Image (cartoon, grey):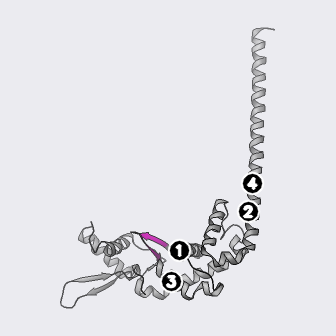
Amino acid sequence: MSRRAAGLSSLERYLDQSQSYNSLGTSLAAQQSASLSSQLATFQAALSTFSSQHRAKILSSPTFRSHFSQLCAELGVDPLGGGAKGLWDKIGVGDWYYALGVQVVDVCLRVRERSGGLVALDEVIREVGAGGAAATTTSEATITEADVQRAIEALEPLGCGYAILSVGGKKVVRCSPGGLDRDSLVVAFTARDDKGAGPWDLDRVERALEKALMDDGMVWLDEQPGSSKREYYALGLFVLE
């Protein structure tokens, strides 16, 4: 056999082995993927069974509810979505969140005239907990910030425009469908936290305050009789007892 023929034969064997290794690698990857998918499906089924068995505790305990939601996230389960009925819906917790969302909207609409498009998150939680969705579902339920967040997310398909914002360490519920101007938000929080001191020039401050006052209804204006002094109050940033 010539050296050339031997070389070609060796190359063919190498290519055959390489193709076999590739096929084996593809097969092993497919098997591993199928195994992981099967395990995930098993975990999700077990999660659904667990949620059904512990429905009352999920409803009544905010800590248990939070841990359960974290577990769902780790397993890639969206409790409020996923198919025709989400996991929350299957065990009746979805209705609880939708009812809570309605109560959040009710609270925000009730105080919007004085607070504009912002309501302090603490106030929303207190008002809802005093006689809202918790009372209509279970007398033992305690409303948390995470619950309000999920309730707002549940209403998102309706296009309400509600969201929880955090500016300067203060959390508020935005209840303005058209959103709020960023400058208006910043100037209001600056006035609250820094007693009016900020880096902007006077023109920008006046434009932001005018929009917050006239367009967004987010601040109140107090003009002092016989004085050029004007005071602005962003009531939505405070919890009124």
As drawn, the label of residue 126 is 3
Which residue is the site of mark 4? 37
- Residue 165 in magenta stretch: yes
The majority secondary structure of the magenta stretch comes to strand
Amino acid type, label 4 = Ser
As drawn, the label of residue 44 is 2
Q: From this viewpoint, which residue is outermost toward the right?
A: 1
Amino acid type, label 3 = Arg
Front residue (pair 37, 227): 37
| Mark 3 secondary-structure assignment | helix
In the picture, which quadrant includes the N terminus? top right
Relative placement, left or right, of 187 versus 179 is: left
Amino acid type, label 2 = Gln
Relative placement, left or right, of 230 versus 187 is: left
For the magenta stretch, what is the residue range? 164-173
Amino acid type, label 1 = Glu
Residue 80 location (% of width, % of height): 65, 71
